[in-house]
């Protein structure tokens, strides 16, 4: 049968499909939903995705254009993934073309088709004379231990890709040197489905499970071929990763794939290392640190079934895994799983949706579950598992509050904290100092006239970056040189205000000059492989003092860190955002969990001006579980999520009156069971020269909320202000500060 018309999703901000004619030169049998086509759109050609086909059309042929060509490369979206993506677009009320394009690697979104090279992998050479290899390795071990370490890794795990090797902290130079010495060789990766084999599992690496861990693993394995959502609520250091590893065994043994989602790239090296040690199976990575070609190769490995395990950040949830058998979401509470621009999806939530569609189990792990997830577990919607003990000799560290109002401060450190750091260092242990503010100082000002260097596009102070000798706006990324004189009064008395990690590193180096200090934040880890390198140096005890932002707060295992100091948590105690206290508690518990993870006991010291604040007292004395249940009670009384459902309409324009009038017009429509809050200026009203307002729609049920959002989006077409503003809708918003 000749298909005459197709409906195509195109990556444009329009909530509709476009109809095209299929010319007679194209065989109708080649037309499949999910396939890519090149179509004319306006004055350009774009890649579109076929959503449906038909033999008739309501639109006259003379008004329709023909498709240019069908992309015949077998890299189309499979039916189950296409159905899943359409559901995501519908739930988040986002243009379907944008959503479908997000599921494709960049190179497959382009009209010019890429040359598809098979991924290459590295293998150790086979030697006829064992002595020759032994002699060469002895020399390398003495002169270049990192090369020897890389060779041992490749020898144990044949078939590693360059992306994996780089993620694990090795350099191209080390790889090339081993190749020149003919110790390793590069081969093209086979494009066939992985097959589980006898050597796939390193049995000697398996740890003995505690009773609590064994119960969880059994529960996940029992739901092997049916949908079930398991929340693993385990204190930091309780062995959640070991639970994941052993729960995966049954899935992999059945030649099914496993998808592991992590919140940030920073957690990828450590997770990859653990998985490489346990499984001798193809593992692929998916995150923003990879180039376009590497991402395409991961996508193809997932689609062809070559990859047994995919480890990735939030967008990995769209990987075209044909044989997916288990999904694991580590640190499920983390805000990084929520996309904050364009298609604003929550990766954890749609991972649960995908598991339900495929009828497979999903495991959510966290030491500090989000209140939404916890409520679902407590109500019986998810299976709730708790890990209350750390395996081995390690114990959970106790949090102690330091009242900075009663202490003399030096460089942001109280006398009590300085003494504790000194004692820790003398014992040969490491200390972690947490300050969630990168840069040298959050502002600079004139000591004479009190002028402050403000970003005119955001009305917020520039952050001083001393190392780069720049003032940088952390909101719009604009930069300017540090002025030598005050532009207001001409004074040269310009000083930094406040403290960031860069300044803290400098001051700590002065106070403890006999010890090595390392700073880990977004500025110090910009280079590829730099994060893995710094984390390895910390593990090797090359540095005794660690200074960092929330990049250091979660997932990392530092055996010799016995003291964690938190310098500033007070901002969250008085925030307008109802989620601020929850996020503060999660961050505090996560960073506290970096201390005392081995047999050495750990301490956590938190500096605050408000040690008697009830939220801090509850968290310190009763722990996160009690804090979370108390917070859920408060949310229920206030009818806030998870006991209600929200959508956030955002609007921005060059003049403040435009977004306000645009959103005010939306409130003229009334709905049963829905309330409006706003429109009000965003917490940061001006950003990058645009004035921003938002409007919250809250409903008692999801059905009521989505009906209201659907109606409101349709009324926007008649809104007289809609052409003067840029607007978006965010379903289940996490960040109201915007």
Image (tube, rainbow, N blue to C red):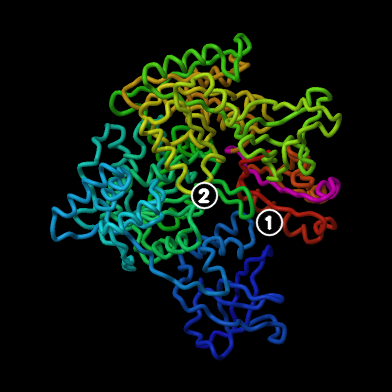
Q: Which residue is mark 1?
A: 710
**Residue in the image at 62% along x and 34% along y:** 439
**Residue in the image at 26% along x and 35% along y:** 209
Residue 88 shows in the view: yes
Residue 348: x and y in percent read 50, 47
- Give above or below for 467 relative to 581: below
- Give above or below for 303 relative to 242: below
Rendered image quadrant of residue 247? top left
Task: List the single residue furthest toward the bottom.
Answer: 24
Marking on residue 43: none
Residue 221 shows in the view: no
Residue 100: x and y in percent read 56, 64
Say if the magenta span includes residue 656: yes
**Residue in the image at 66% along x and 43% along y:** 699
Pick whichever, 222 or 329, lies toward us. 329
Q: Which residue is mark 2?
A: 347
Instruction: Name the N-terminal-most of marks 2 and 1.
Output: 2
């Amino acid at each position: 049968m000749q298909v005459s018309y197709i409906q195509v999703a195109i990556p444009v901000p329009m909530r509709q499909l476009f109809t095209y004619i299929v010319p007679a030169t194209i065989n109708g049998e080649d037309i499949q939903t999910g396939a890519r086509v090149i179509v004319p759109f306006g004055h350009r050609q774009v890649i579109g995705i076929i959503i449906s086909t038909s033999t008739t059309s309501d639109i006259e042929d003379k008004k329709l254009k023909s498709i240019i060509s069908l992309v015949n490369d077998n890299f189309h979206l499979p039916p189950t993934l296409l159905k899943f993506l359409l559901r995501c677009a519908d739930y988040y009320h986002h243009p379907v073309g944008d959503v479908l394009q997000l599921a494709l690697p960049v190179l497959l979104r382009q009209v010019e088709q890429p040359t598809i090279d098979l991924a290459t992998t590295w293998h150790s050479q086979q030697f006829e004379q064992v002595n020759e290899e032994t002699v060469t390795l002895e020399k390398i071990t003495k002169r270049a231990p990192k090369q020897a370490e890389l060779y041992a890794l490749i020898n144990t795990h044949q078939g590693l890709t360059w992306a994996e090797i780089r993620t694990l902290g090795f350099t191209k130079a080390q790889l090339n040197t081993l190749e020149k010495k003919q110790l390793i060789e590069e081969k093209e990766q086979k494009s066939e489905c992985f097959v589980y084999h006898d050597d796939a599992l390193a049995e000697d690496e398996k740890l003995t499970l505690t009773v609590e861990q064994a119960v969880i693993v059994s529960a996940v394995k029992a739901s092997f071929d049916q949908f079930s959502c398991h929340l693993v609520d385990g204190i930091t250091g309780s062995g959640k990763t070991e639970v994941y590893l052993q729960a995966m065994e049954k899935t992999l043994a059945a030649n099914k794939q496993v998808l592991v989602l992590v919140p940030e790239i920073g957690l990828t090296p450590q997770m990859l290392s653990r998985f490489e040690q346990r499984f001798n199976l193809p593992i692929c990575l998916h995150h923003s640190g990879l180039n376009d070609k590497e991402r395409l190769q991961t996508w193809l490995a997932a689609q062809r079934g070559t990859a047994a395990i995919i480890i990735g950040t939030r967008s990995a949830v769209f990987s075209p895994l044909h044989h997916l058998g288990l999904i694991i979401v580590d640190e499920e509470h983390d805000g990084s799983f929520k996309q904050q621009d364009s298609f604003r999806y929550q990766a954890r939530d749609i991972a649960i949706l995908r598991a339900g569609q495929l009828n497979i189990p999903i495991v959510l792990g966290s030491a500090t579950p989000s209140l939404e997830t916890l409520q679902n577990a407590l109500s019986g919607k998810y299976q709730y598992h708790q890990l209350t003990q750390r395996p081995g000799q390690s114990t959970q560290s106790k949090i102690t509050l330091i009242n900075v109002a009663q202490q003399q401060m030096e460089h942001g450190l109280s006398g009590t904290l300085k003494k504790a750091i000194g004692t820790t260092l003398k014992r040969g242990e490491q200390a972690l100092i947490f300050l969630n503010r990168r840069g040298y100082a959050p502002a600079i000002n004139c000591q004479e006239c009190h002028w402050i260097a403000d970003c005119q596009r955001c009305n917020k102070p520039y952050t001083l970056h001393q190392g780069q000798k720049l003032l940088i706006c952390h909101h719009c990324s604009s930069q300017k040189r540090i002025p030598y004189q005050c532009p207001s009064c001409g004074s040269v008395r310009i000083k930094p205000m406040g403290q960031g990690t860069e300044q803290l590193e400098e001051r700590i180096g002065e106070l403890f000059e006999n010890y090595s200090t390392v700073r880990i934040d977004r500025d110090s880890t910009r280079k590829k492989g730099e994060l893995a390198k710094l984390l390895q140096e910390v593990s090797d005890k090359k540095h005794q003092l660690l200074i960092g932002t929330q990049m250091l707060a979660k997932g990392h295992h530092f055996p010799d860190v016995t003291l964690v100091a938190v310098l500033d948590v007070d901002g969250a105690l008085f925030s307008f955002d109802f989620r601020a206290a929850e996020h503060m508690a999660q961050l505090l518990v996560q960073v506290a969990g970096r201390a005392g993870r081995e047999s050495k006991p750990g301490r956590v010291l938190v500096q605050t001006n408000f040690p008697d604040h009830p939220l801090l007292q509850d968290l310190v004395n009763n722990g996160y579980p009690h804090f979370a249940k108390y917070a859920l009670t408060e949310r229920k009384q206030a009818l806030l999520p998870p006991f209600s459902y929200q959508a956030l309409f955002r609007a921005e324009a060059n003049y403040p009156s435009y977004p306000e009038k645009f959103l005010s017009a939306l409130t003229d429509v009334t709905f049963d069971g829905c309330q409006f809050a706003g429109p009000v200026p965003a917490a940061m009203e001006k950003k990058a020269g645009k004035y921003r307002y938002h409007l919250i729609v809250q409903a008692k049920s999801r059905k009521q909320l989505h009906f209201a959002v659907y109606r409101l989006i349709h009324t926007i077409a008649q809104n007289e202000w809609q052409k003067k503003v840029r607007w978006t809708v965010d379903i289940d918003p996490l960040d109201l500060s915007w």
